């Protein structure tokens, strides 16, 4: 169920990314697919997050004037890193997820820019200004989208306590009755 | 993950190599698929926008109604005069443009999408190879030059704007034949500014002068308006002018464009052998 919800969210995010710029130019600073990819990575399902990153990145690249694969590369990398961090650190609180999304947005912008420089296709625009606007837009929009996604989630989809803590904490309890024997 | 990263990296390397010359196959077919989403969304958003505009207009309609009634009679008189002038203008215009129209047709297209990436500013139009659009065809508006077609799918095409820093075109300040202020117009990192290079410092140039294409770049036909000079640092006998141009076309707000069905004259054998020449596929 969670997978279906995230897949639908990703499709909507890609469509929004394709179309919203024609409606209002500043909306381009919101990276909708990145928001969903980071959310998927925070669910501690690395494979799904990585696939989401590659697919959404390639779809955005296909309609962009930039290099095909640049978005896919960066989003895949971010999905992997975030899912690995989420496996080790407790991040089921929205306040903790916001800085993760902000960091992902900054890393995404800088890596994307660097890759284009590397391949001799420098993008237009000031890197600092564009990164700053992307950070603000993506973080604010992401906060609302995460709230929406959490409210749509079922109880089963919410993280189980067992998933939040490492295996070491689940020490096997000895039966006091059997100990007494 | 490593495999996916590798695939993306290979795609990037391949795309970077094909960026200037060939047709990008993956991009083309994704554009075709995206057209089924973008066209309806563009239609819906424009109709919704028009609806809200009409509601806001209704508020002021009542007060304007009284004023308008007063003007109606005056306008009716003016209208008859203007109709005569308009018909005369149309006839003269058609006669003047007859020669240009015989050179290349203009295919009207609607902008159905903008670049989804914040770093680039290309546009998607609703005309493709089925309509006769081909790679490198010039795209214009009534204001002036917009850019060129960089990817063509059967139903849509991608247009790179002249403001992109990788773009370049041969241009002249003033009309061709009347001026020897030739140079190259390139994009800058700014969205509403172009730069003109290699104009000799001894040539007389002023702010406000218009810049037109020369046709020497092998892509754009001569005589298209590029923009107007807005900033100028005078050169000398040994240094060229530093010229900044504002594009004539409103690149941020364009909704309809024209694709010039223009094919540049074939390059000579010598030109095609040059190391930086665009290879025809």
Image (spheres, rainbow, N blue to C red):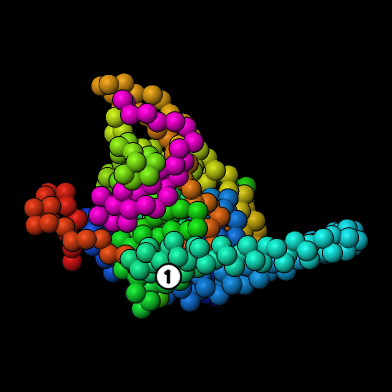
Query: Please, is residue A52 above or below residue B170 in the view?
Result: below
Tell me if I can see residue B123 in this picture: no
Q: Quadrant of residue A146?
A: bottom right
Give the residue drawn at x 39%, y 53%.
B224
Q: Quadrant of the C terminus of chain B?
A: bottom left
Give the residue drawn at x 25%, y 61%.
B264
**Can you identify the residue that label 1 sits on?**
B107
Image check: B83 left or right of B166?
right
Q: Nearer the viewer, residue A38 or B78?
A: B78
Q: Quadrant of residue B185?
A: top left
Place of residue B263 in the rendered image (x, y in percent of width and height, measured from the top left)? 27, 64
Q: How many marks?
A: 1
Q: Nearer the viewer, residue A104 or B192?
A: B192
Tell me if I can see residue B134 in this picture: yes
Q: Nearer the viewer, residue B110 or A9?
A: B110
Place of residue A181 in the rendered image (x, y in percent of width and height, measured from the top left)? 54, 63
Give the residue drawn at x 40%, y 31%.
B205
- Does dot 1 land on a helix, a strand or a loop? strand
Give the residue drawn at x 38%, y 76%.
B131
Place of residue B254 in the rendered image (x, y in percent of width and height, measured from the top left)? 53, 58
Q: Is residue B175 magenta?
A: no
Image check: B280 left or right of B223?
left
Considering every residue shown, the one lying at the far bottom of the view is B130
Place of residue B62 in the rendered image (x, y in percent of width and height, measured from the top left)? 89, 62
Image check: B11 left or right of A125?
left
Q: Chain of mark 1?
A: B
Query: Please, is residue A127 above or below residue B99 in the view?
Result: above
Q: Which residues are magenta?
A: B201-228
């Amino acid at each position: 169920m969670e997978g279906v919800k995230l897949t639908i969210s990703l499709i909507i995010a890609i469509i929004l990314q394709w179309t919203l710029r024609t409606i209002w130019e500043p909306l381009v600073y919101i990276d909708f697919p990145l928001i969903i990819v980071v959310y998927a990575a925070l669910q501690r399902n690395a494979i799904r997050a990585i696939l989401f990153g590659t697919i959404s990145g390639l779809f955005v690249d296909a309609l962009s004037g930039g290099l095909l694969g640049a978005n896919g590369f960066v989003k895949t990398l971010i999905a992997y890193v975030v899912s690995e961090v989420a496996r080790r650190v407790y991040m089921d609180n929205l306040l903790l997820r916001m800085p993760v999304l902000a960091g992902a947005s900054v890393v995404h912008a800088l890596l994307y820019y660097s890759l284009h420089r590397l391949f001799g296709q420098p993008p237009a625009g000031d890197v600092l200004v564009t990164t700053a606007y992307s950070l603000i837009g993506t973080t604010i929009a992401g906060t609302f989208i995460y709230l929406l996604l959490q409210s749509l989630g079922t109880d089963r989809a919410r993280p189980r306590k067992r998933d939040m803590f490492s295996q070491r904490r689940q020490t096997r309890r000895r039966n006091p009755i059997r100990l007494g024997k | 993950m490593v495999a996916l990263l590798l695939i993306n990296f290979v795609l990037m390397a391949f795309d970077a190599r094909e960026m200037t010359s060939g047709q990008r196959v993956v991009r083309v077919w994704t554009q075709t698929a995206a057209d089924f989403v973008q066209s309806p969304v563009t239609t819906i958003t424009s109709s919704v926008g028009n609806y809200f505009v009409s509601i806001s207009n209704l508020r002021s309609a009542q007060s304007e109604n009284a004023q308008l009634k007063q003007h109606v009679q005056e306008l009716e008189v003016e209208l008859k005069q203007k109709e005569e002038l308009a018909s005369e203008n149309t006839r003269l215009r058609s006669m003047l443009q007859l020669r240009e129209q015989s050179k290349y047709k203009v295919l009207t297209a609607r902008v159905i999408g903008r670049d989804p990436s914040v770093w680039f500013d290309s546009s998607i139009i609703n005309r493709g190879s089925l309509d006769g659009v081909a790679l490198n065809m010039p795209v214009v508006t009534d204001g002036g030059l917009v850019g060129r077609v960089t990817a063509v799918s059967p139903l849509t095409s991608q247009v790179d704007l002249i403001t992109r820093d990788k773009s370049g075109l041969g241009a002249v300040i003033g009309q061709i034949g009347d001026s020897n202020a030739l140079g190259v117009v390139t994009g800058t990192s700014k969205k509403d500014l172009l730069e003109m290079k290699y104009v000799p410092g001894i040539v007389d140039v002023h702010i406000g002068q218009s810049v037109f294409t020369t046709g020497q770049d092998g892509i754009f036909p001569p005589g298209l308006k590029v923009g107007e000079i807005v900033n100028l640092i005078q050169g000398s006998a040994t240094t060229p002018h530093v010229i900044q141009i504002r594009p004539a076309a409103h690149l941020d707000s364009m909704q309809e464009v024209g694709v010039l069905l223009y094919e540049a004259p074939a390059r000579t054998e010598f030109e095609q052998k040059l190391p930086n020449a665009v290879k025809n596929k």
